């Protein structure tokens, strides 16, 4: 239970800096995550490597 003499307005003022700090950290984390996603994807799709034929890929000769 909370004490009966709680001053809600004073508690709002006391918690405001902490809430602003939490919001700023969340915003910073979102910006960093977005920048990381953009820098790692680079906007270009990687080319798929072409398979090189080996001995098992050669068609049998009619002979």
Image: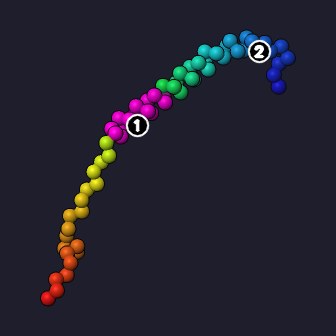
Q: On the image, which quarter does residue 36 sit in?
A: top left
Of callouts 2 and 1, the N-terminal one: 2
Left or right: where 51 falls relative to 29: left
Q: On the image, which quarter does residue 53 sit in?
A: bottom left
Residue 37, horizontal then vertical, whole percent: 40, 37
Please identify the residue farthest to the bottom as the structure is shown: 63
Nearest the eye: 5 or 43: 43
Does the stretch in magenta take in 54?
no
Q: Distance between the residues labelled 2 and 1?
A: 42 Å
| Residue 50 in the image: above or below residue 54 | above
- Kindly identify the residue that appears in the image at 48 percent across and 25 percent down: 28
- Kindly identify the residue that appears in the image at 80 percent across and 15 percent down: 6
Q: On the image, which quarter does residue 1 sit in?
A: top right
The part of the chain drawn in magenta is 29-43
Please identify the residue farthest to the right as the structure is shown: 4
Q: Name the residue under label 2.
A: 8
Left or right: where 61 falls relative to 42: left
Q: What numbered label is drawn on residue 28?
A: none
Q: How many neighbours does mark 1 have within 10 angstroms: few (below 14), some (14-19), or many (20 or more)? A: few
Q: Name the residue under label 1.
A: 37
């Amino acid at each position: 239970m909370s004490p009966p003499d709680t001053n809600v307005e004073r508690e709002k003022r006391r918690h405001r800096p902490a809430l602003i700090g939490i919001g700023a950290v969340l915003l910073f984390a979102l910006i960093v995550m977005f920048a990381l996603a953009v820098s790692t994807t680079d906007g270009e799709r990687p080319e798929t490597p072409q398979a090189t034929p080996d001995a098992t890929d050669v068609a049998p000769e009619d002979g």
